Image (cartoon, rainbow, N blue to C red):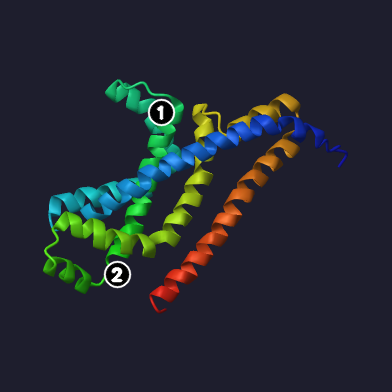
Amino acid sequence: MNYDFSWIIVERALPKLFDGLLVSLQLTVWANVIGLTAGFLLALCAISRFRVVRWLAVAYIEVFRCTPALIQIVWFYFCVPMIFGVWWSGFLMGVLALGMNLTAFNAEAYRAAIQTVPSSHLDASVALGLGPVVSTLLVVLPQALIIAIPVLMTNAIGIFQQSALVALISVEDLVYQGRILAGETYRPIEILSTVAVFYLAISIPMSQLVGFFESRVARMLGR
């Protein structure tokens, strides 16, 4: 192999790669804002006593969990404008697709966590005169959130990695910038290896935090 590595190219490319990383992080943050809030509401619908509500929630979860995120992103970008006449930017479409995808996975995490909340806690909230909404917000949500934290964080790492797919709809994220720079410099090994390092630098510490919270939650539950 006679390939001459030139890491000076990486140094020159860093400003654009950091710009792309910022876009990737923004996508991840906004997708998690959607996924954490809507996921809890969807979990409540999935365990609703009303059959129609429960079926609709389960159908949503299955559709988004059983289809590739790539198809969802491309579908939102090309089909939503044609169907609804809504012309949003690729970034916004990417946030919407990633957020709705994450909502389905977080809903399952919340649903499993909600089912571990002791029924005696709900009985106590009823005895205190708390209404269903207040009980859900003050009794169920805090406990479910703590129990679900490891899974929610794992899902957040996954959505950060899947945010790379928005490069296909010309969102200038980390992968998009890396692909353009690799083509301009004819140095794909150095540029794309650096892109991989960026993802590792964020994902590995996050995965360590997941392990930490898993042990804390297990200890709290007495496992």
Q: Nearer the N terminus, badge 2 or badge 1?
A: 1
Decide: is 173 above or below 218: above
> Where is residue 199 drawn, in percent x and y?
61, 46
Query: Which residue is found at the position 76% from the left and 34% from the top?
Result: 11
Tell me which amino acid carries mark 2: Thr
Tell me which amino acid carries mark 1: Tyr
Residue at the extreme front: 128
Numbered marks: total? 2
Q: Quadrant of residue 178?
A: top right
Decide: is 68 above or below 176: below
Residue 94 located left or right of residue 205: left
Residue identified by numbered label 1: 77
What label sits on residue 116 in the rendered view?
Answer: 2
Q: Quadrant of residue 113?
A: bottom left
> Where is residue 117 drawn, in percent x and y?
27, 69
Query: Which residue is found at the position 78% from the left and 32% from the top?
Result: 9
What label sits on residue 6 in the rendered view?
Answer: none
Q: Residues within 10 Å of mark 1 (few under 14, many from 20)?
A: many
> Where is residue 162 drawn, in percent x and y?
50, 43
